């Protein structure tokens, strides 16, 4: 096929799936060979393909917060520091000042170099680490006043392999500073293996169809994706809106953080603009966003508001304008600002603000707000195993809910947070108990914690766990106690986050939202995660669905009557006449 030959629709679809298949092979490698639970249980990693000019091409089954922006910036940083690539090179980048999301996300970048020495693509494997060298045994240093107090090892696009051989200087640095060096080494090998498998598969695909065909596909696929996004935006009404979404008070942010999102929809030109410049300067804590997370979180809100079949790549990104400024908490941080928690807390408020603004502007689009993270049930546990004395550090994913309701559906219940789109798995309690010296006493969804609405938000999950025969620490950065997730178009707020410790004598003590908590033998920590916002008036939810919600214990009978206006009979079904009267009374009271 000649360089200028256009591809037809069938060829485009096949090549797209072939490239997605390459990403899936990379992801499968990481999932099956990673050693830490954050990878082989929770699946907190992403794999993607970037073009030689640093544009995202394919990212199947990846966490949106990892890949919508960041791989492009990281690949550009690699090219800046290493202008000449050779086959067999590999680079490590986890610098939030050079395109990475946050320091915990070690990213391996492998340039794909053809037989003539020309750089064609870059394979990217990003994986959250169990430990990244922070001054405390957690990868979420919410209270760190700067990167120095945070303590993470920062690798700004550093070469880690040459001629397919590891550069041992870098490996020794990591082994010396990371608390679980053998576990880290296994995860490093898993990432490197994933990137090399991607390189091998892409070279094989090029041998089959030709580099010119892949170049032609890339150009046409970007144009097609741009057209799809433009078409979706043209369906929306013209207009603008400024919304705020608030983070709770926090160390370094004693008054909380009010995130302001200024959204403008221009359907005539097929463009959405998200302006984040009117926000506070960077703060002396770990909540500041990296540039990658600032851009990505805005784009997440847009993609959550359009047809899910719009391809997320550099082509569709052309229709999303994100305006940032330097030294802004949701902008472009300057060294030595800490971005330890950049992927979650404040980033979620940006994405939530965008999708809620679109919902209020356009009937039938957008979403409510997803519940906040990271509660203790999704915290980092650390300590020593009582039988061997071996140190352990790992993030657990024991329980989260908080999905946001949408214009046509109830929430995806176990979304985790808006930035991972439900792609992280929840841990098996039994497996965690086998791997770590902990026991899980309780795990269940709590009724009435999902935002009420025509479509219901996802509930919050309560988890109680503690050490088994030892002491341990739990590091977390919870949000949503004062400012729970908001609903959209008349939908209700989600439930609030709560965390406390239950002492051996049965007494309880409320915990701060950001803490590194010691939990002694005989004690447990109790974590209630946030619920998500509802969409539309709860008085519009069909009576039969409300009755089903009560039977399934998503809501209580009291809430059915007081919030949804549904009166249940003795058989558990809705009393139609009584419910219609109740709804009229609630509607008149609301007016």
Image (cartoon, rainbow, N blue to C red):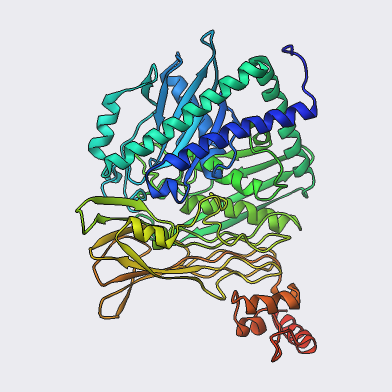
Which residue lies most toward the top here? 116
Instruction: State the image coordinates of residue 36 (x, y, percent, origin top left).
Output: 37, 46
Q: Residue at x 25, y 76 (%)?
A: 504
Is residue 188 or residue 400 the one in the foreground?
188
Which quarter of the rendered picture does the C terminus lie within?
Answer: bottom right
Residue 485 horizontal side relative to residue 408, left or right: left
Q: Report whether residue 435 is seen.
A: yes
Q: Quadrant of residue 479?
A: bottom left
Is residue 192 or residue 78 the one in the foreground?
192
Is residue 487 or residue 431 the one in the foreground?
431
Which residue lies most toward the bottom here? 570
Residue 587 horizontal side relative to residue 380, left or right: right
Q: Is residue 202 above or below residue 242?
A: above
Q: Is residue 224 above or below residue 525?
A: above
Q: Residue at x 55, y 40 (%)?
A: 295
Instruction: State the image coordinates of residue 85 (x, y, percent, origin top left).
Output: 45, 15
Q: Residue at x 48, y 47 (%)?
A: 43
Residue 468 horizontal side relative to residue 586, left or right: left
Q: Quadrant of residue 10?
A: top right
Q: Is residue 172 above or below residue 331?
A: above
Q: Residue at x 51, y 10 (%)?
A: 117
Image label count: 0
Instruction: State the image coordinates of residue 143 (x, y, percent, origin top left).
Output: 33, 53
Which quarter of the rendered picture does the N terminus lie within?
Answer: top right
Q: Report whether residue 275 is seen.
A: no
Instruction: State the image coordinates of residue 331 (x, y, percent, origin top left).
Output: 49, 41
Q: Quadrant of residue 334?
A: top left
Residue 189 horizontal side relative to residue 417, left or right: left
């Amino acid at each position: 096929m000649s360089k200028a030959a256009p591809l037809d629709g069938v060829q485009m679809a096949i090549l797209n799936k072939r490239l997605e298949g390459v990403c899936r092979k990379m992801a499968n490698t990481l999932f099956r060979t990673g050693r830490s639970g954050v990878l082989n249980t929770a699946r907190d990693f992403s794999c993607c393909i970037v073009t030689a000019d640093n544009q995202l091409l394919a990212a199947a089954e990846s966490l949106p917060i990892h890949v919508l922006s960041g791989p492009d910036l990281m690949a550009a940083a690699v090219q800046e520091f290493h202008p000449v690539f050779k086959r067999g090179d590999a680079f490590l980048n986890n610098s939030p000042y050079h395109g990475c999301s946050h320091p915990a996300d070690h990213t391996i970048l492998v340039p794909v170099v053809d037989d003539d020495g020309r750089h064609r693509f870059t394979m990217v494997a990003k994986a959250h680490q169990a430990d990244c060298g922070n001054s405390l045994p957690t990868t979420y240093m919410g209270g760190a006043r700067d990167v120095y107090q945070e303590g993470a090892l920062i690798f700004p696009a550093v070469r880690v392999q040459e001629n397919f051989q590891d550069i041992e200087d870098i490996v020794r640095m990591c082994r010396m500073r990371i608390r679980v060096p053998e576990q880290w080494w296994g995860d490093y090998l898993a990432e490197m293996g994933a990137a090399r498998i991607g390189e091998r598969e892409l070279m094989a695909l090029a041998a089959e169809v030709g580099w010119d065909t892949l170049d032609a596909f890339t150009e046409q696929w970007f144009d097609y994706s741009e057209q799809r996004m433009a078409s979706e935006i043209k369906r929306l009404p013209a207009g603008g809106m400024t919304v705020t979404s608030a983070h709770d008070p926090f160390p370094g942010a004693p008054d909380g953080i009010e995130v302001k999102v200024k959204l403008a929809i221009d359907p005539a030109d097929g463009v959405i603009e998200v302006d984040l410049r009117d926000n506070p300067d960077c703060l002396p804590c770990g909540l500041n966003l990296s540039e990658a997370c600032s851009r990505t979180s805005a784009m997440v809100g847009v993609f959550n508001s359009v047809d899910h079949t719009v391809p997320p790549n550099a082509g569709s990104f052309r229709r999303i304008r994100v305006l940032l400024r330097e030294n802004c908490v949701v902008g472009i941080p300057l060294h030595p600002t800490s971005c330890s928690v950049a992927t979650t807390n404040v980033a979620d408020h940006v994405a939530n603000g965008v999708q809620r603004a679109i919902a209020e502007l356009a009937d039938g689009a957008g979403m409510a707000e997803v519940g906040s993270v990271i509660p203790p049930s999704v915290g980092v546990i650390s300590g020593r195993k009582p039988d061997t004395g071996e140190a352990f550090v790992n993030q657990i994913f024991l329980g989260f809910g908080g999905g946001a309701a949408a214009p046509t559906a109830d929430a995806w219940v176990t979304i985790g947070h808006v930035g991972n789109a439900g792609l992280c798995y929840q841990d098996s309690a039994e497996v965690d108990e086998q791997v770590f010296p902990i026991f899980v006493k309780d795990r269940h969804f709590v009724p009435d914690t999902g935002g009420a609405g025509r479509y219901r938000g996802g509930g919050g999950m309560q988890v109680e766990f503690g050490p088994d025969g030892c002491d341990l620490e739990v590091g977390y950065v919870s949000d949503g106690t004062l400012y729970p997730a908001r609903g959209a178009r008349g939908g209700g707020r989600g439930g609030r986050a709560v965390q406390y410790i239950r002492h051996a004598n049965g007494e309880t003590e409320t915990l701060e939202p950001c803490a590194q908590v010691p939990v002694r033998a005989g004690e447990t920590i109790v974590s209630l995660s946030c619920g998500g916002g509802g969409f539309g008036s709860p008085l519009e939810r069909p009576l039969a669905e409300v009755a089903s919600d009560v039977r399934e214990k998503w809501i209580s009978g009291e809430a059915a009557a007081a919030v949804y206006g549904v009166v249940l009979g003795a058989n558990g079904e809705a009393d139609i006449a009584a419910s219609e009267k109740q709804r009229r009374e609630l509607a008149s009271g609301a007016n």
